[in-house]
Image: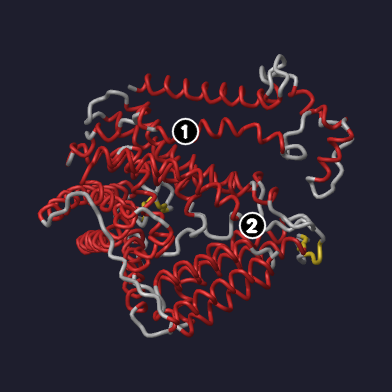
Amino acid sequence: MHIPDGYLSPATCAVMYTSAAPFWYVALHRVRDALHTRLVPRLSLFAAFSFVIMMFNLPLPGGTTGHAVGIGIATVVLGPWAAMLAISVAIVIQALFFGDGGVTAIGANCFNMAIVGALVSYAVYRLLAGRSPIESPRRVMAAGLAGYAAINVSALLAAVEFGIQPALYHTASGVPLYCPYGLGVAIPAMMLGHLTVAGFAEFFVSAGVVAFLQKSDPSLLGEAGLRRVAVSQARPLWATLGVLMILTPLGILAAGSAWGEWSARDYSNPAVRQQIAASTFHQAPPAQAPAGLERLSSLWTAPFASYAPPYVRSAAFGYLLSAMFGAGLVTLASAGVSKFAR
Amino acid sequence: MSARHGFIERTVDGLYEAMEHALHAEQSAGATGLLQKLDARVKVAGILSLIVAEVLSHRLWVIVSIFAGAVALAMLSHVSLATLASRVWIGALAFTGPIAIPAIFLTPGAAIHRVPAIGWPVTMQGLTTAALLLARVETAATLTLLLVFTTPWNHVLKALRVFRVPVVFVVILGMTCRYILLMLETAHEMFESRRSRTVGALTGPERRRMTVSTAGVLLSRTSQLSGDVYLAMQSRGFRGEVYVLDDFRMSRLDWSAVAAFVALAGWAVWAGH
């Protein structure tokens, strides 16, 4: 799960650092507001705990053992923002001092495990635990499933980051410069181990520690003040979202077609056929669109096909409109889920 | 190692190794060698720039040259090859080897050989990509560990201020490093004491219960300790503001090292393309 140096291109690493930065910023401000002067000792101690918990060998059914990252339990006890920071600190120390995970890949590792992991864990836990009492067995199951979901979503992200490398970064003779496996290999290879071994390790640690704390120290599970995600305080995230939406028309400037996003009609268009060949090591595409693609492509017609509604003439405006519509839908869905979970 | 206690042994060994690694790094950083004489800021910036340069490089011989340079630096800094082999190279090879080797057969390209009996094609593209991956991982891991083996941890963290890392983050990293050692020792003692009291075989659910209850106890102690540490900090006048004493001084040797690191990284980026 900890991506070492050399598996991801510097450009991917830079994108991952940039993606993680606004979350770190918001998390630091959010946690500082909640903890005030307690910030330094509390985060330090819990980061140290996250580090040590990653070294525990957990016996799993079937005779094997696995390591947990501790995303689930850190989120349940600390809340998403503080967990994000604590796990990030643990990842930085692992990379810098123990050589576990790469220095250039710190952004990617933190984004996958600390940021997305904590947010997924938080969403699943809130959704499943609801308003059940602290001592409820429902919370045990919710924590376990939160950890299981978080580690698997993190692994999926890492697999996608690995899988896009050979398509994006290769020499003229087809030598992949970084991770050599495409999505077809990277995703099954990563997910097999995480859905079976690492996921269950995370499940047992999260559920087991919550069950233990319910009996021995329930106060650790009741710090609701840290767990609420205040949308209004996430201003930098909103600002970043706004800037990204404004920048969406930049995609029009990119030459060629997006690899693998060809439609059935593209196979009969000589210009697009040339682009497909150029982006696939000069291998000629099939003379006709694959039968399955042709059949399935007619199943659903998107309202904003090619990111431009039919009544909008400007492609750039269409992109912007699509970005606003998409972001709005995601925000509404998130608000709906969080309201349901409350 | 008996099978019934295997997971306890492995956890205890892992915790012990981590503590031993930290101790060795501190001892090695105190030795008298070339890198130990350099300013921590120069080392952090120089070694990180070399890591970025080798990741940017597309040519195997350039990466191998940086690796050779790292080994030479290690020898000049009294970091033995045996230490590098046991703590870096074997681990990196064990992790990346199983990932890199299948690429030799799976990467499409011109087949230069077929494996006898099974007929799998060995492609030039596959060989090159596997070699690139292995070389990059080994070189980056060597450079990272070289930094840690020649610089006290608190100096590495203070040097991060050069990169405009917020001071509060540097302080959190520093405190975390300190308490990691305490937590490792606590966890180690908990597992050791449990091992010494265990008679007979534990069932799977018992072993899982034991591990998660250890994690739970550790979490409770963490929470309690964070409160105690906070009170101790408050009683010493801590009011939330954190400061780091940047007491580094650049010498002529440091400036020469800066020039050497810049030249080497620049050359690697230029030659690597």
Please report the residue visible at 34 percent of the width from the left and 53 percent of the height from the top.
Answer: B169
Q: Is B208 situated left or right of A262 in this image? A: left
Quadrant where the C terminus of chain A sits is top left
**In front of the other: B266 or A49:** B266
Q: Is A273 situated left or right of B234 in this image? A: right
**In front of the other: A309 or A314:** A314
Q: Which residue lies under the disc numbered 2?
A: A178
Gap between marks 1 and 2 measured at Cα: 33 Å
**In front of the other: A48 or A31:** A31
Q: Amino acid at mark 1?
A: Ala
Hey, which quadrant is residue B158 in on the image? Answer: bottom left
Please report the residue visible at 41 percent of the width from the left and 56 percent of the height from the top.
Answer: B164
Please report the residue visible at 50 percent of the width from the left and 71 percent of the height from the top.
Answer: B142
Q: Is residue B136 something one can see in this rendering?
A: yes
Residue A312 in the image, given as x and y percentages of width and height: 70, 17
Instruction: Say how the picture is coloured.
Output: secondary structure
Q: Sequence-wise, which precedes: disc 1 or disc 2?
A: 2
Q: Is residue B54 above or below residue A291?
A: below
Q: Amino acid at mark 2?
A: Tyr
Callout 1 touching callout 2 (CB < 8 Å): no
Q: Which residue lies under the disc numbered 1?
A: A239
Please report the residue visible at 69 percent of the width from the left and 49 percent of the height from the top.
Answer: A168
Using the image, tell me which numbered label, if any, was put on residue A128: none
Chain containing mark 1: A
Chain containing mark 2: A
